[in-house]
């Protein structure tokens, strides 16, 4: 389903309802933001699970698409999988900082990864061996 140039209209509505249901205010500029489906969590582009959705700027959304492999660029071949952007030393540092209660969004920014990647490290979904 497409309305105008914005795909994902159903997920946009679903995310707005999620905000209302949870009494979480919508971001002020949400009309200018993309309703983005988080990469890694699942790869169904039609998915409307509000837990998988977030407000993103068009450029952040494009980065997610690269991460998710939806948008393919020649230089990211083989690096679309979760955690592959990081090396073991970085993950060790991240884990240490998580123990020190560093914020996930700050770590994500610092290491240039999606916050989902940091969540997965914290929850032991990825990089369990470190
Ligand atoms: Zn999903």
Image (spheres, rainbow, N blue to C red):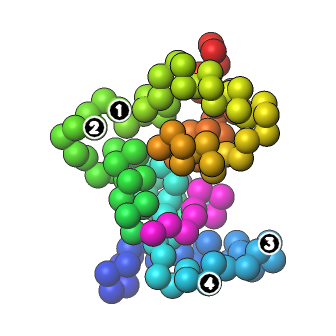
30 up-or-down from 97: above or below = below
Q: Secondary structure at mark 4?
A: loop
Q: Which residue in the structure is indicated by mark 3?
A: 22
Q: Can you tell me whether the CB of the residue at mark 3 lies under 8 Å from the nearest atom of ligand 1?
A: no
Mark 3–mark 1 Cα distance, whole angstroms, equals 35 Å
Marks 2/1 in contact by CB < 8 Å: the verdict is yes
Mark 2–mark 1 Cα distance, whole angstroms, equals 5 Å
Residue 28's tag is 4
Mark 4–mark 2 Cα distance, whole angstroms, equals 33 Å
Q: Residue at x 33, y 86 (%)?
A: 4
Marks 4/2 in contact by CB < 8 Å: the verdict is no
Residue 89 image position (x, y, % from top left): 54, 19
12 up-or-down from 108: above or below = below
Marks 1/4 in contact by CB < 8 Å: the verdict is no
Q: Residue at x 47, y 82 (%)?
A: 32
Mark 3–mark 2 Cα distance, whole angstroms, equals 37 Å
């Amino acid at each position: 389903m497409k309305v105008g140039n914005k795909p994902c209209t159903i997920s946009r509505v679903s995310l707005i309802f999620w905000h209302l249901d949870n009494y979480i205010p919508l971001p002020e500029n949400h009309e200018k933001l993309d309703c983005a489906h988080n990469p890694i969590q699942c790869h169904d582009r039609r998915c409307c699970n509000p837990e998988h959705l977030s407000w993103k700027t068009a450029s952040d959304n494009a980065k997610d698409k690269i991460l998710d492999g939806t948008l393919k660029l020649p230089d990211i071949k083989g690096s679309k999988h979760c955690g592959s952007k990081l090396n073991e030393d970085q993950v060790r540092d991240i884990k240490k900082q998580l123990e020190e209660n560093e914020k996930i969004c700050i770590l994500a920014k610092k290491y240039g990864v999606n916050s989902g990647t940091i969540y997965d490290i914290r929850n032991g979904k990825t990089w369990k061996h470190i």
